Amino acid sequence: MFKTMGRAFMLLLVMTLLTGIAYPLVVTGLSKVIFPKQAEGSLVYKDSQPIGSVLIGQNFSDTRYFYSRPSAAGKDGYDAANSSGSNLGPTNKAFLDSAAKQAAKVRTDNGLSATTPVPGDLITASASGLDPDITPEAAQIQVARVAKARNVSEQQIQALVDQYTQGRQLGFLGEPRVNVLKLNMALDSL
């Protein structure tokens, strides 16, 4: 019995070293060599200070910026340490009330009529609660508001939206999208 327990303990020790220490170190080392920017979190810097990550959504509430997708991550949203969706289904009253309230806010902020359809990504949180991208349609709705707040032409803002719109990956995966952080940084560079 002690011989069997000894072998089991040795196997546990070896597997712990292999899968708990060696494998993570090798994968981390390789990722830092092959994909250095991504391995460090795809951080974006301004004046040598990190201001965000292109992979994690942020809250932009100033009318001079494009708004991100709403977040259900953490108590106040956009908490990268607390990534989660709301887990509310499409028939849940709290979800429906929240979506109606958010749609009304988007319409009011962007000077839209009460019957103008609002893209779903400006109304509902993603599964992670930290989606960094919005659809081109969600960006389009915000062009006039951002142009007015920045006192520039809508054509200039639309050109930036077009420039920062990414197509489908490999031409067929996913949907076209606009990274909100990159777009808002470009706005600051105008």
Image (cartoon, rainbow, N blue to C red):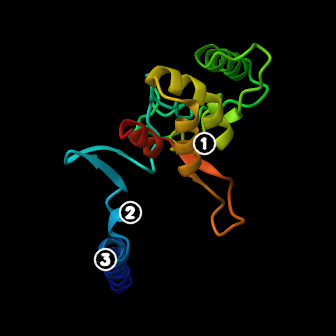
Q: Give the secondary structure at mark 1.
A: loop
Residue 91 appears at what percent x and percent y? 79, 26
- State the mark number for residue 33: 3
Q: Is residue 47 visible?
A: yes
The image shows residue 101, relative to residue 75, as above or below, that is: above
The front one of 21 and 183 is 183
Given the image, on which type of amino acid does mark 1 rest?
Answer: Ala
Residue 146 appears at what percent x and percent y? 51, 26
Determine the residue positioned at 42% across, 37% down.
187
Query: Can you identify the residue that label 1 sits on?
Result: 127
Residue 148 appears at what percent x and percent y? 52, 21
Q: Is residue 63 visible?
A: no
The front one of 91 and 65 is 65
Q: Is residue 51 left or right of residue 86?
A: left
Q: Is residue 131 left or right of residue 4?
A: right
For disc 3, the neighbor class at 10 Å (few under 14, some 14 to 19, many from 20) is few
Q: Is residue 76 left or right of residue 29?
A: right
Query: Can you identify the residue that label 2 sits on?
Result: 38
The front one of 125 and 149 is 149
Determine the residue positioned at 63% across, 30% down.
122
